[in-house]
Image (cartoon, rainbow, N blue to C red):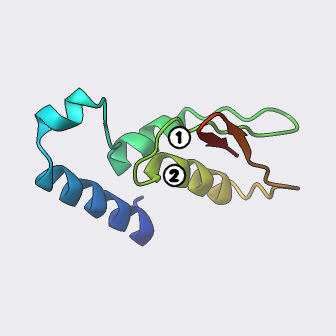
Amino acid sequence: MITKSLHTLDHVRKSFNGVTSRTSRSKIGQFLTPAAIAQFMSSMFERGPQQVRIMDPGAGTGVLFAVCVETLVLQKIRPLSINGKYLGRVLIY
């Protein structure tokens, strides 16, 4: 199931890909995950007994992180806290 917000993020991805060349995206190693692929990846999500850690190495539209959070919400998992950490130039929640 792709929610309206994920559909919007996927539209942003498609629009961006439409105005940038595959060659220029390849040169900088940029890949924007399609919502369907992100959902497949989140279906393999394994939850530990006490905590969930999500590390999304991307800096695109945020669809991978959004799908992981959506998966947790649909499983009715309520966090006690949400923490973010900067590791260099990367923010980890």
Disc 2 to disc 1: CB gap under 8 Å: yes
Check disc 2 and give the amino acid type. Answer: Val
N-term-proximal mark, 2 vs 1: 1
**Could you tell me which residue is drawn at 26 percent across and 63 percent down?**
11
Alpha carbons under labels 2 and 1: distance apart: 7 Å
Secondary structure at badge 2 equals helix
Q: Is residue 45 left or right of residue 60?
A: right
Which percent across, then down, holds residue 54? 65, 39
How far from the left and from the top, in percent, is residue 78?
80, 58
Residue 27, located in which quarter of the rendered image? top left
Residue 26 in sight from this viewpoint? yes
Which residue is painted at 88% across and 56% down in the image?
80
Q: Which residue is mark 2?
A: 67
Please state the horizontal and vertical placement of residue 23, each as a whole percent of the image: 12, 32
Horizontal arrangement in the rendering, residue 56 relative to residue 28 (left or right): right
Above or below for 26 versus 75: above
Marker disc for residue 42: 1
Q: Secondary structure at mark 1?
A: helix
Q: Quadrant of residue 45?
A: top right
Q: Residue at x 61, y 53 (%)?
A: 69
Q: Is residue 71 above or below residue 38?
A: below
Residue 50: quadrant of the picture? top right
Of 71 and 61, which appears nearest the observer?
A: 61
Q: Position of residue 37 (x, y in %)?
A: 36, 40
Q: Which amino acid lies under the numbered mark 1 shown in the image of this protein?
A: Ser
| Residue 3 visible | no
